[in-house]
Image (spheres, rainbow, N blue to C red):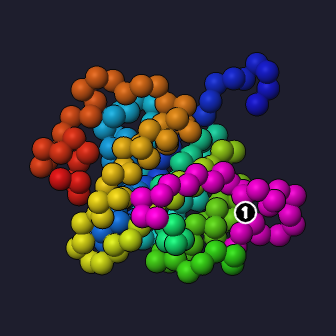
């Protein structure tokens, strides 16, 4: 950016996960909530399955937040936000992070998807990965209480990271089921 170009790029939230696997649904739930609360000025996409498609979903001018469940041994509901590339990766030759991440339930891991975007010239200038520690990933399990309690703080964190304005009154109208947070939280 130059001193004359101070307009931020478009905001994009990618909610990664599987709605049918308990805490893995946190990414899609956050993305769907944010799409309802910020219908203008925010693109929110749910990504279930193959993360290699991420490189086609964003552009270099996007400001991106990727929200996904994680398992690190922290307390359930713990949230971390990590800028990409991670500290210490700048100036490295070769792939950033590829092969250094633990096994993933996705076809390729997030680090490999980010590296693919870099190779294709589609890596956004600003990417933040927001991980929410999960504990229940069984098929058809609901969100654990700790992860359900983390959803609203994660929405607020992502909105802050992307410099989104306060949501419009009434933008968070309840979805089917009557929960203001939407499906999966009732």
Image coordinates of residue 164 in percent, x first then y, are 49, 30
State the residue lying farthest toward the front. Answer: 75
Image coordinates of residue 154 in percent, x first then y, are 44, 47
Q: Relative to 108, does residue 28 appear above or below in the rendering?
A: above
Observer able to see residue 91: yes
* Residue at position x 81%, y 59% in the image: 88
Q: Nearer the viewer, residue 83 or 46?
A: 83
Query: How many C-alpha atoms fall within 10 Å of the one at disc 1: few (<14), some, or many (≥20)?
Result: few
- The part of the chain drawn in magenta is 75-98
* Residue at position x 35%, y 59% in the image: 146
**Pointer 1: what residue?**
119
State the residue lying farthest toward the top. Answer: 4
Image coordinates of residue 92 in percent, x first then y, are 86, 63
Q: Is residue 182 left or right of residue 79?
A: left
Q: Relative to 173, does residue 73 appear above or below in the rendering?
A: below
- Prevailing SS of the magenta stretch: loop
Image coordinates of residue 137 in percent, x first then y, are 34, 74
Figure quadrant of the N terminus? top right
Q: Is residue 38 left or right of residue 1?
A: left
């Amino acid at each position: 950016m130059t001193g004359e170009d101070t307009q931020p790029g478009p905001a994009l939230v990618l909610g990664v996960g599987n709605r049918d696997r308990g805490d893995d649904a946190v990414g899609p739930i956050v993305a769907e909530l944010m799409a309802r609360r910020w219908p203008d000025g925010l693109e929110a996409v749910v990504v279930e399955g193959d993360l290699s498609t991420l490189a086609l979903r964003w552009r270099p001018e996007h400001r991106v937040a990727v929200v996904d469940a994680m398992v690190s041994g922290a307390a359930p509901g713990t949230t971390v936000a990590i800028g990409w590339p991670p500290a210490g990766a700048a100036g490295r030759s070769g792939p950033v992070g590829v092969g250094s991440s633990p096994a993933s339930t996705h076809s390729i891991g997030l680090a490999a998807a980010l590296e693919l975007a870099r190779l294709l010239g589609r890596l956004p200038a600003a990417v933040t990965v927001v991980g929410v520690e999960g504990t229940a990933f069984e098929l058809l399990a609901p969100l654990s209480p700790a992860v359900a309690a983390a959803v609203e703080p994660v929405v607020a964190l992502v909105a802050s990271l992307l410099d989104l304005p306060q949501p419009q009154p009434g933008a968070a109208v309840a979805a089917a089921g009557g929960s203001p947070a939407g499906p999966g939280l009732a």
